[in-house]
Amino acid sequence: MSYLTTSRCRLFYHDTAEEDPSSKDKPAVIFVNGWAISSRYWKPAIDLLKPDFRCISYDQSGTGRSSIEGFRPDFTIQGFANEAGELIEHLGLDRSRNLHIIGHSMGGMVATELSLRYRDALLSSTILACGIFEETAFTSLGLMFLGGLIDVSMNFRNIFLFEPLRSLFIKRAATGQISKEYSDIIIEDFTSSDKAATNAVGKFSIDPEALRTYTRNVLAIASPVLCCVGMADHTIPPEGTVTLFEKRKASTDSPTRLVQFMSLGHLPMLEDTGRFVEELKKHFDFAQHFYKKSQPSAQLSDRTQIP
């Protein structure tokens, strides 16, 4: 576990190569977090991946163990991509095509920006629970209403420390059962994250122009992309990820695959870690073969539904 002083913050990160130096030669996976949460929730997935991959997780500015004291970071997609980019370059992950990028929820927007910036290093992208929606008067009204809810929830977020609101908050995030350890982490991270950062992230995640840019970025990624979603997600409507997949399939010949966990919610990496990691490994293996121009792996199904 280490710190990197960036232009935005003193960034906390964890690199499994610190524990196992031999993993520096393995394909690298960097995990980009969702809204108002630290990197701790990736640990169960990392524990399963680290025998075969170099795994890097980090706390974005405004969350977890990263410190913004003495800094004045801008809380934008580009700003969050800048700090992740500094970490990628610090670790030398930009020097060869050996990098998988995973973005969860709002982290999917940051991950796609990184995927374009480091396209020559990229093996694959995974977008988890970060979809798009057709622009209509109804969806515009819904996004405006959601923006209001973000303001309210941030002003009164400490109420989620207590029952029954604590359990309701967790059930909205995770449809499947998760351990008390990670329930506590989710609540602690949300209630202790920097208020300005958390408010800004919540707002740009639903900003129409930011969503249009995000869509363009997803379509522009030349490497294989996995769209992954829990279809029982009560935090972000899962249909948006299906729409994103269909738009990319219709707009580009670059490999695209959709995995739908039919009974899971917004946190499949915690709700069913084994199945989630199995699908990641399939995607990573496909990407390796894609760049080796191996034909058999191209027979992977475009769409997978998992009960």
Image (cartoon, helix red, strand yellow):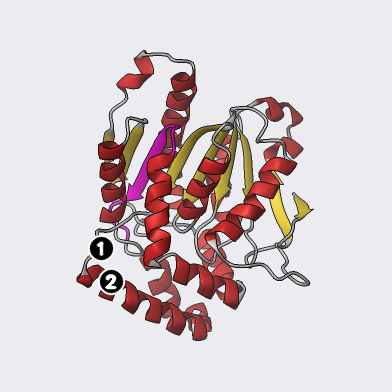
- Tell me the SS state at disc 1: loop
At label 2, the amino acid type is Ser
Residue 235 drawn in magenta: no
The residue that mark 1 highlights is 135
Name the residue rendered at 62%, 39% in the picture: 55
Which quadrant of the rendered structure holds the C terminus?
top left
| Picture disc at residue 140 | 2
How far across and down, in percent of the image, does residue 152 sit?
Answer: 44, 84
Name the residue rendered at 69%, 47% in the picture: 87
Q: Are marks 2 and 1 in contact (CB under 8 Å)?
A: yes
Name the residue rendered at 25%, 63% in the picture: 135
Residue 243 seen in this snapshot? yes
Whether 229 is drawn above or below 292: the answer is: below
Spatial CA distance of label 2 from label 1 is 7 Å
In this rendered view, identify the residue nearer to me: 293 or 35: 293
How far across and down, in percent of the image, does residue 32 sit?
Answer: 55, 51
How far across and down, in percent of the image, does residue 151 sit?
Answer: 45, 82
Residue 63: image quadrant is: bottom right
Which residues are drawn in magenta?
A: 221-233
- Left or right, residue 107 beside residue 61: left
